Amino acid sequence: MKAKTSDKAVLSVLLMVSLGHFLNDMFQSVIPSIYPMLKENYGLSFLQVGAITLVNQLTSSLLQPFVGYLSDKHPRPYGLAVGMCFTLTGIVLLSLASMFEFILIAVALVGCGSSVLHPESSKVARMASGGAKGMAQSVFQLGGNAGRAVGPLVVALFVVPNGQRAVIWFAIPAVLTIYLLSQIGHWYKRQLAIIGKGKSKFDLTNETHLSHRQVIGALLVLLILMFSKDFYTANIQSYLTFYMMDKFGISVESSQYFLFAFLLATAVGLLIGGELGDRYGRKYVIWISILGSAPFALALPYCDLFWTTVLAILVGMIMSSAMSAILVYGTELLPGNVGMISGAFFGLSFGLGGIGSALFGWLADITSIQYVFQVTAYLPLLGIVTYFLPNIKE
């Protein structure tokens, strides 16, 4: 009877963990959204702006695989709420920071919060999937992408008019998120008592019959694909506002709405990618997602304001559909290691994004922001390596 009770709770838990992801990533998106404000207030260079992203995302990327590994071995149901406490501290410090060094400490704390949330939440989504792993992962990630989309909108409406100190108001939903994540922790704890700590009941045994060499090769291909995707999206997320202001002369407030449109499109694409991956296979979704976005990415730097907006939305929607497919594909290569794989892939995504942001910030300082957008437009062409991914039969 306990198992049946837990099955009935699947949908509500999946929505709750998605909401927790929404709020966490909304806080994360506040950081790049206030870059123009910080750059002006403290006279920061583009390289320093990139360094802020680098510190924030490296704290996530370096810790997430380690947290995921420990989660597989020793699950911590209430670790989700503890992680949000780090994020809350970072938000408060960011609102009060008056020096570049304090800004770096604040964003590092926010990154630590994400390093705990992503691996554990991904495992909860897997447990609540009902067997539809791709869709469950998409719903979970949809919350995060939607949160990143809403963040710039909230910043444009409330933070930009009132200044950096207005960031402190994000502490209120952060406290509510801690409560929400503690409720998820209750369900997680009960699930562990029912099915044990080793695997979700929907984890697969290794039925792919791939050799060790094939598994390593597939993981290397996924690494290249994530490099392509995350370097490109890091440039858009960190510098789209500067690009729109520089090329089209729009205001800071208006630029946030274009970033909101791009991030909202990524949320929609993520949900579509999960459904298509469950129906037709992960490899096909990865093909279409990364390589299919290349023509739009290549055309974007040469368009007027209207078509730049349209193409940014299309690129965001198409490219984002790959993430859930890549993540689920990775967990099927190494079944029984959901926490470690999720932590490694989310961490890799953040780490590559941080490195890309810092690199492109340096390039923008010595050339121009428009030149950076022209160079990064070629990255989606690396999607051609999807050809080398082996087919996994479920």
Image (tube, grey):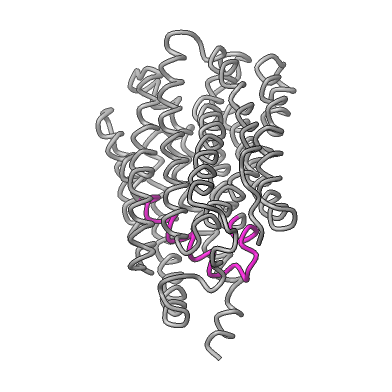
The quarter holding residue 106 reads top left
Which x, y percent locates residue 146? 59, 48
Residue 349, above or below 43: below
Within the magenta stretch, is there residue 115?
A: yes
The residue at the far bottom in this view is 1
The quarter holding residue 298 reads top right
Which x, y percent locates residue 389? 61, 43
Q: What residue span does the magenta drawing correspond to? A: 113-137
Residue 27, above or below 300: below
The quarter holding residue 301 reads top right
- Classify residue 285 as left or right of residue 120: right
**Number of numbered callouts drawn:** 0
| Image quadrant containing the N terminus | bottom right
* Of the pair 393 and 340, the residue shown nearer to us: 393
| Image quadrant containing the C terminus | bottom right
| Residue at image point 62% right, 39% down | 388
| Residue at image point 50% right, 61% down | 335
- Classify residue 97 as left or right of residue 258: left
* Of the pair 353 and 330, the residue shown nearer to us: 330
Within the magenta stretch, is there residue 59?
A: no
Which x, y percent locates residue 322? 62, 43
Main SS, magenta region, reads: helix
Residue 362, above or below 222: above
Which x, y percent locates residue 81? 37, 63
The residue at the far top in this view is 367
